[in-house]
Image: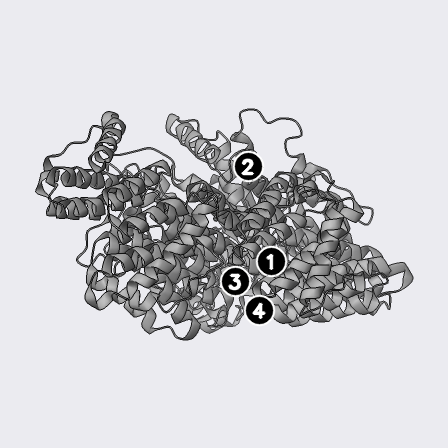
Amino acid sequence: MMADEFRIEGCHGTIAEQKDEAFYDDRSDASDDEEKGKIKFPTRLYGREKELDGLKKLYAGLLAGEVDDRDDKVLKSQIVFLSGYSGVGKSTLIKEFVKQLRGSKNQPNKTNHNNNDSPIIYGAGKYSEQNSASSPFFAIIEVLETLANELSEANDSSDTATEQREKVRESIRQSDLIGPGKEGDLILRATFPVLTPLLDSCVAVVEKGANEDLAVVHPTMSAIKECTLQLLCAICRVLDNPLIIFLDDLQWADEASIDMLNVLLTSSELKNLMFICAYRSNEVDVEHSFCKLMDNVAKGDESVEKLELFSLSPTSITSFIADSVKKEEDTEVTELSSAVYQTTMGNIFFTKQALEELVRKNILFYDMMCFEWRWVVTKVELANNMSADVVESVLGKIRYLPEEIQGLLSLMAYIPNALDVPTLKALICRDGTSYEERQVLDLLQQSSDEGMLLLVNPNWIFAHDRIRQASLKFASEKSGSDETLLHISSVLLAEGSDREWCQYVAVDILNSLPVEKTDCNELVKLNLKVSHLARNSGALGKENALVHKGLERLKAAGMAWTNDYYELTRQLYDALLVSEYSSGAYDAARVAIDEVVQNAKTPDEKLIAYTHRVMCLMSETSEYSRGAEEGLEILSKYGFDIPLSPTKTVMAKEEMKYKLALRNRSISYLTTLPIQDDSLLALCQQINICAMYSGKLDVMKLLTWKIIQYVLKKGSISSNLAPILGLCALMYVKLDDVKRSNEFATTAQALNPRIRDDKSNYVQSVMVVCYAMCLLQPFRSLTDPFLQSYKDFKLMGEVEMALNGLNGYAQCFFGAGCELGPIFESKLLVVEDYCRNLGRQSSLILFSMFRQFALNLRKPSDSPSKLVGEAFNEEQVLSELEGSAHFQTLRDSSSLRVQLAFVFWNEADMIDLLKILETYPLQDQFVARLHNRLAFTGLAAFAMCHRKDCASYKALGEKCMSRFKFLSKNGSVNARPVYLFLKSMKSPSRDAFVKAIEACAEGKFVNLEAMVNERYAAFLREENDETASNDCITEAYFLYQDWGAHAKALQLSKDHSFLKKVKRMKVKMKKQRSVFRSTKQRTAQ
């Protein structure tokens, strides 16, 4: 019996289509549907006043810039975790919340609290049970699409909206990472094509073919996360009202989305944003990935609120039912409400389905004679006629819909994404039937009228995931479901050549079918193709699953490693071993590696497997020595015979071969050779790293010589050669061979511009060259390259290398005496977030320590030479560490503290710290870190050795000074000022101090120049030259301010009252300084 027939034959009342009577009777409701037997639900929200008020207060606090009492910082963002069962009304609550915010006429401005009419930007996305296994970032893409459309289209033509859109565009243009043409711009376009309208709007003229490079962009997950974060930062920082992002059903979020959210929700950079994350509380446990995400986000963060949404109360349900059946008094529906509540327990979606089910069964009917909704059965009968399960209730509704609508819902149920009309038309046109677009729209509108679908222009989606579940269950009950799935997948592959999600859904559908239903060759190729898309989107889990599916199909068909499928099998296993390695599944990677090694036909085809075998040893257990040993064994198969413990005879013999191959040419000759891919050099590069970190420097030398002979004979190089030469430069740094270190570093540096397209090798080369260049190049010139290497490695997902780059930046920053301040500290804060998110505790400690060091110099404190404050607590941290972690942390903290003790002249602390530092070796492969440690160890040692109980420290100072003397003679611009400063502290004289001051000024070492002037002032005071002493103190005072050491400048002003009256004439400062120095020189003479 069809639905229309059911409605006509009433068994409990008159509900026939008496349109004439309804039309002529004044009691008819003109707003009702023409068909009076159809219930119409009210649109207002019931029973959520408390929750709405809470959300509004949170938004108002964010809008007003509430202060976090812990550290006097504006809240970075407002995060709300909204929980509740399915159908309880989470999404409806948020829609109403946003609707009321947008409808509010008075929105306080966060800066001046005046009214403003700037629009509130809102983006929403929803996960489904199916799409979690489909395309990555599903709901996040929906959010970004909404934002892109709102911020690029002129839907709102008001002046404020137009101005706000232009602010956002300008903010994106100004970004160093995601601005037009920048790497981040390409990454965002490649990963999230929905952003194209917004990114295009940021370019004055979009040149033809401007995005042709997108095909070669292969971003890492780290790059995608960083670019997305910076995009949201660029948007949020210029909006007049906080951005609202709502993600629903996060219990089904994919791995990539969880990874992304872990960054977005914990970032200190992201401000002016309200992030609402909804999930089903009954479908997550403590082991669920989203539950772990919440725990991580909520740690010590007062900007996180948890809001649990319970089912509606009986009173609210009664009011809703009374309004639905148009009763003026709630008491008129008490019996009906009680029966419905007993079945649905206050779940609003279930309540609607239950009422519709009663209408379908004519238990609840519209009496055309009385013009009212009625029921004439007992409460028990009411309850017996309602399904106990909401999906069954919806399924019952679907069974009474027209067949065409049933077919449409069945097809859509297999596809988790929103669908446009052309795609839906292609889906329903099958088995000889055809539809015009107008007919498809009519079907969609009928489905919408039945409450099954929603239009989210221009796409159509299910009104609720329970409706999708019911539709899927209905489709599975019908015969021919395999043929239906084949039809759907073919349509998606044909229609979605430019839409990645279509390929994700199609391959998942085909993988679910029996082997005999699909073309093995085509399906395996599709799995491999889509796995590459997943990898480029940062979804390593999805990539891994697809590669496994492809291999399963090959094995099931008995085709693996057969002649016809050999190349395809090898490609799958290469992809698998890379995927397993990238995700940290090293045992699984080794299984894939062994498979390739055993079955690949040629040595060259085994190189990727061999390279990853060595990389697994390094990454999993840091077995560098074993990695070098196994690596050399592998190289022997390729003609590289290198002993693990080479004798002097072997070294001499191989060096001679190396020199003969060069033919008296410098190694810079290598920069003239053409560049070609060479997997063998990639393997050599990994073995070189193992040799470096295991201390096998002779092996490293031999391998480098062999590599140079190899490329000279071949007549070409690969991009791997640059980082190999850079590593060799670092090796010579460890050997104190300044000349050769500089030779290899400059050659690698010359190669770098030619290998920019190979991002990984380029960035590695840049960083190792920076480390090597610290010997001779000014620290100041290396800060930007180190900082850039940190950003690049961060985008590549190379965490350890990224943190090494930032460490290099900070050490060079301190060593160069660059200006301290909030900008530098904010960079460290961002890195601390990065370390915290990745669980890198040792790095978090280090960068927190750096920030506390900078704060001690900038802000006054009672104990400036102790690392205790808002960023770091040395005593507490050290008490929690043991072994090598304690040893290294104590070295780093003592190195910083001895500098603070010297600057603030705390003799007791200098003595205590020297006792610690003298136990550490005077060596370190990190030049800048060693420079800073030895510089202030030596200065403190000479400062204290005049005391009888500290005379032994003179020898320590001399050891430190000897290194700087050696480096100075070899041309180090960083070492010379330190050497002269140490010399003046060891043997104080006017001439020694003047030379030190001039060297510091020439090298722009503001920090050292300030300290030398202060020490010179103390020397002059002892010689009773008060005038010259005061001049030096004045000079030091202003230099400390230039450095950003305002706490030290304040200390000087307290100790020397005349400084409070001194005014600095910046224009004349250089002249005064030169006159002052010449005066001192004449005085000395």
Q: Residues within 10 Å of mark 4 (few under 14, many from 20)?
A: some
N-term-proximal mark, 1 vs 3? 3
Does the rendering let one see residue 372?
no
Q: Mark 1 and 3 residues: CB-CB less than 8 Å, in contact?
A: no
Q: Residue at x 65, y 45 (%)?
A: 758
- Disc 4 to disc 2, how far (Cα)? 35 Å
The residue that appears at 43% across and 44% down in the rendered structure is 779
Check disc 2 and report the residue beneath it. Answer: 182
Which quadrant of the rendered structure holds the C terminus?
A: top left
Mark 1, residue position: 468
Relative image position of residue 537 (x, y in whole percent): 61, 51
Q: CA distance from mark 1 to mark 4?
A: 49 Å
Badge nearest the viewer, 1 or 3: 1
Query: x and y percent of residue 853 in the render?
Result: 30, 55
First of labels 4, 2 by sequence position: 2
Residue 88, located in which quarter of the rendered image?
bottom left
Image spot of residue 721 (x, y percent) = 67, 49
Of callouts 1 and 4, the N-terminal one: 1
Q: Nearer the viewer, residue 1006 or 612?
A: 1006
Q: Which mark is residue 358?
A: 3
Closer to the camera, 962 or 779?
962
Residue 125 in the image: x percent, y percent? 51, 50
Label 4 to label 3, Cα distance in Å? Answer: 67 Å
